[in-house]
Amino acid sequence: MQAFEITCRPGTQDQVFCAATAMAAYHVGTIRPGYRVLVGRGKDGADRRLLTVADADFFIRRFQRVVVGSGDGIFAALVDDLRSRGMKVGVVKGRGAISTNLYHAIGRGFDAAPAPLVTLDFNKPFAA
């Protein structure tokens, strides 16, 4: 979440969806009251829960851009779908790896220009 917030700097007009385990969701909800926090359980539960509200048609009607704050491959199909329909899509990830499928999805799209991929190394100082 830190990589997402540093990079995207969500404002009051942005809608942020976040999914986590029950304990983490409680803490996110208390420190980020404007975020829509969803609870997922089990293996990939948070990711799967987030995808239940990640409707491409809804995003295209309501937003100018979508930023995925994860490097997990489960989001590749969504990113690919949105980009193929002309949506501006970015991917922000922290220290972990990015899945091959997601990496390829951000490189394809309707304008053939790669989507932004931001990787933050928290071992180095961040300059705003």
Image (cartoon, rainbow, N blue to C red):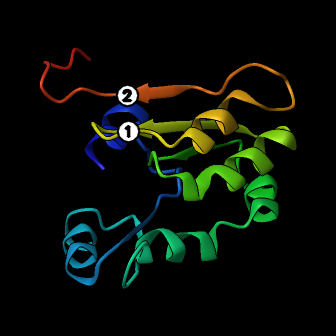
Query: Visible in this render: residue 64?
Result: yes
Frontmost residue, 116 versus 44: 44
Label 1, on which residue?
97
Query: Visible in this render: residue 37?
Result: no
Q: Position of residue 48 (x, y in %)?
A: 53, 74
At horizontal 66% and vertical 34% (from top left) the residue drawn is 104
Circle 1: element type: loop
Q: Position of residue 58 (x, y in %)?
A: 77, 64
Q: Which amino acid type is shown beneath numbered disc 2?
A: Thr
At horizontal 19% and vertical 80% (from top left) the residue drawn is 23
Q: Which amino acid type is shown beneath numbered disc 1?
A: Ala
Label 2, on which residue?
119
Frontmost residue, 116 versus 97: 97
Report the residue that reaches farthest toward the front: 100
Label 2 crowd bin: few (<14), some (14–19), many (20+), radius 10 Å: some
At horizontal 58% and vertical 35% (from top left) the residue drawn is 103
Circle 2: element type: strand
Q: Is residue 13 above or below residue 17?
A: above
